[in-house]
Structures are given as structure tokens and as C-alpha cells.
Amino acid sequence: RGGPRPAPRRYLGRYCARMPEIRVRKIKAFSVGGDVRAVIEGRFLSMRLHARRLLGLQGVHRITATGGGTNSRPILEVLANVFQAPVYTNRATSNGAAVGAALRGLHARAADRKAGGGHLPLSQALPELRYEDTHELVAAPDPSLAKTYADLLRLYADAEDYDVA
């Protein structure tokens, strides 16, 4: 804890987990595409792990993607597979953050009026808002990859736990 420490030998270098079964092996280099995919998978595995650890989310029933990444179908497919949840984009606007902020404001106002500031599900706060009317399914999870990504998540969590210990 009191300063930098050397990384454990088992995590030095680049590793590849062959799918669908997980066999971790050290490699000299990925292909350029393999490097890019590894970074994307790593970011989404991190998001899933931290959503579970920090927010207590054990599962996600849908994801709404916004921003520039929504233009890349392969990125959205990886997202859907890592979380095992369908991915949607807002078809009404490219300003997803602004729309989300406005909806959150309406939600807070309705919660204040209807529940005295307490918790009120969005579906009750804005019953006229139908998700399906404003969003488009852009990527569906491949159920055959659920175990693979669950195994990768355990490996990722193990590496992170060692690093912060």
C-alpha cells in the first residue's frame, strides 16, 4: 500500500483468453484488431464489474447507448454480449445527454409532486413516455457468449482485486 509495487509475475505481459472456452495464455502481440477489441472488452468488463460492486446491479435488462460509439455496430455488439442485455439508441436525437438531462429533470419534478420527493419509478413519473417509441434496438446479446463473458469478468475482477490489494 505505501507506494509503487512491482506487478505480480502472472500479470506481466499480454494475455489472450481463447473463446468460447477460457484458456488464458501469454502471447507476444495481438493483431491491431485484437488490440482494439481487447481494449473495448476491457472497458465494458470494467463497467459491468463496477456497476455490480458500486451500484449493486446484478443484471441489466437494457442499455441505452449515446455518443459517437453508437455509430459502430461491432462496439455495440460487444457491449450487448458483455452485459448480456439488448442495446438501444435514441432515434429522435443525437443529443442524448441533453435529452437524458431533461427527462431526469421531469422525473425529479414529478417525484417531488407525486411522492413528496421520495422515490418514484420513471414509468410512474412519466407514464406517457414509452421507451419503445423513442428508441431503436441496435444490438442483441448472443446467449452462447454469456458463460464466456462471465468467466472473463471473474478473471478481470481477480486481476483488479490483486492490483488494489
Image (tube, helix red, strand yellow):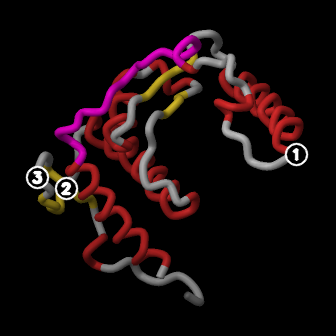
- Element carrying mark 3: loop
Q: First in sequence, mark 3 or 2: give its number.
A: 3
Q: Distance between the residues labelled 1 and 3?
A: 51 Å
Tell me the SS state at disc 2.
loop
Amino acid type, mark 2: Lys
Residue in the picture at 32% in, 45% down = 38
Does the residue at mark 1 contact the one at mark 3 (Cβ under 8 Å)? no
CB under 8 Å between discs 2 and 1: no
- Residue bearing mark 2: 28
**Which quarter shows the N terminus?**
bottom right
Quarter of the view holding residue 155: bottom left
Work out whether mark 2 precedes mark 1 in sequence or the reverse, and give the earlier one: 2
Circle 1 SS class: loop
Label 1 belongs to which residue? 116
* Residue 103 location (% of width, % of height): 74, 27
Question: What amino acid type is highlighted by mark number 1?
Answer: Gly
Label 1 vs label 3, nearer the camera: 1
Distance Cα–Cα, label 2 vs label 1: 60 Å
State which mark lies toward you, 2 or 1: 1
Range shown magenta? 132-146
- Could you tell me residue 51's position as x and y percent? 52, 54
Residue at the (50%, 54%) spot, across then down: 57
Q: Choose between 48 and 61: the one closer to the eye.
A: 61
Mark 1, Cα crowd under 10 Å, few <14 / some 14-19 / many 20+, is few
- Give the residue pinned by disc 3: 21
**Where residue 92 sits in the image (x, y, percent)?**
62, 10
